[in-house]
Image: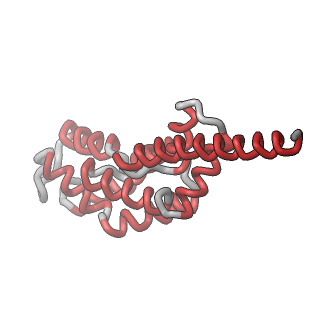
Amino acid sequence: ILFSCFAFLKKLDAILFADYQQKILDFAINLLSYRMRSKVELIHRLKRKKFNEDGIYSVMKILETKGYVDDQKFARAFAREKVKRKLIGPIALRSEFSVHMLDSDILEYTLKKTYDEFPEYTLMDQLLAKRRVPMNKPLDIKEKKNAVNTLRNKGFSWDRIQEILVKRGNI
């Protein structure tokens, strides 16, 4: 009788763990149904919901195996959307990624691919056109300061800013 009681408790434990794991999986899939998330972001959200770490990590393995969580795909989609919508430079994009704590190789690869697809000069040109900075016209000190500040605030490096202003004939 003691052995069958022990076997029953072991089965019950396995069933309860499977049920708990299913709750975590359901919550994670619900989060992913709204938008892609990085692995770290999803783990933080599950921890905030007070799920235990063993359950979270076993569910993360399932999600990664099925391809629902993929930091490489997430980084690519996130970067494309941010650059397309906000016209931001590499410095700002790197800052946006800091929350997601991605592997540095993934981050560098993503930055390279993103700015191959959306060249920095094109983005800066669009920003300057949006701010009505004329081409082929030297800027006075105030106009130049405004143009430089706009591009710096959007996350472009000083070297690139100088190059675009020379190329546009503003310096």
* Quadrant for the N terminus in the image: top right
In this rendering, position of residue 24 left or right of residue 124: right
Quadrant location of residue 79? Answer: bottom left
Q: Which residue is drawn at 44% across and 57% down?
A: 75
In this rendering, position of residue 133 left or right of residue 10: left
Q: Which residue is drawn at 33% across and 58% down?
A: 80
Residue 72's spot in the image, x, y percent?
Answer: 49, 62
Q: Can residue 98 be seen in this view?
A: no
Q: Which of 81 and 124 is in front in this view?
A: 81
In this rendering, position of residue 71 left or right of residue 161: right
Q: Which of 27 and 22 is in front in this view?
A: 22
In this rendering, position of residue 43 left or right of residue 136: right
Q: Nearer the viewer, residue 167 or 129?
A: 129
Q: Residue at x 51, y 61 (%)?
A: 108
Q: Which of 15 and 82 is in front in this view?
A: 15
Q: Which residue is drawn at 36% across and 64% down?
A: 115
Quadrant location of residue 56? Answer: top right
Q: How is the image coloured?
A: secondary structure
Outermost residue toward the right in this view: 2
Residue 84's spot in the image, x, y percent?
Answer: 26, 55
Q: Can residue 36 be seen in this view?
A: yes
Residue 70's spot in the image, x, y percent?
Answer: 50, 60
Quadrant location of residue 83? Answer: bottom left
